[in-house]
Image (spheres, rainbow, N blue to C red):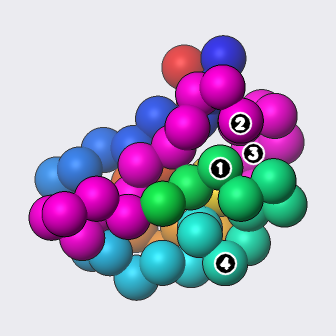
């Protein structure tokens, strides 16, 4: 399962965007992270680097 973003916790720091090895994360018009489920390889890097615990695996 691809990672998910809790938009209430996401502060738009873009740390996950910079760290994603497959560039599966972009920012939406509200400045929140969005994970492309088709590109995500479930590596959990974004989960590990998010300073706000806004990204999780289901």
Q: Secondary structure at mark 1?
A: loop
Q: Quadrant of the N terminus?
A: top right
Vertical position of residue 48 compared to residue 51: above or below: above
- Residue 9, position in %: x, y? 25, 58
Residue at screen point 83% across, 42% down: 43
Q: Nearer the viewer, residue 1 or 35?
A: 35
The residue carrying pointer 2 sits among few (fewer than 14), some (14 to 19) or many (20 or more) residues within 10 Å by Cα, namely some
Magenta region, residue range: 27-45
Looking at the image, do the residues carrying marks 1 and 2 touch, with CB atoms under 8 Å apart? Answer: yes
**At 24% across and 70% down in the image, what residue appears?**
31
- Along the line of sight, which residue is nearer the eye, 58 or 35? 35
Q: Taking 30 as reference, is 45 left or right?
A: right
Q: Which mark is residue 24?
A: 1
Q: Is residue 22 magenta?
A: no
Q: Which mark is residue 18?
A: 4
Instruction: Specify which label sits upstream in the sequence, 4 or 3.
Output: 4
Residue designated by label 2: 40
For this rendering, which residue is in front, 31 or 42? Answer: 31
Marks 2/4: CA–CA distance: 14 Å
* In this view, 16 is above or below 41: below
Query: Are circles 4 and 1 on residues that touch, CB within 8 Å?
Result: no
Which residue in the structure is indicated by mark 3? 44
Mark 1 or 3: the one toward you: 1
Disc sitting over residue 14 in the figure: none
């Amino acid at each position: 399962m691809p990672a998910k973003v809790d938009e209430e916790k996401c502060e738009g720091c873009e740390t996950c965007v910079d760290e994603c090895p497959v560039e599966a994360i972009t920012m939406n018009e509200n400045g929140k992270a969005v994970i492309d489920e088709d590109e995500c390889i479930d590596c959990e890097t974004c989960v590990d680097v998010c300073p706000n615990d806004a990204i999780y695996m289901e």
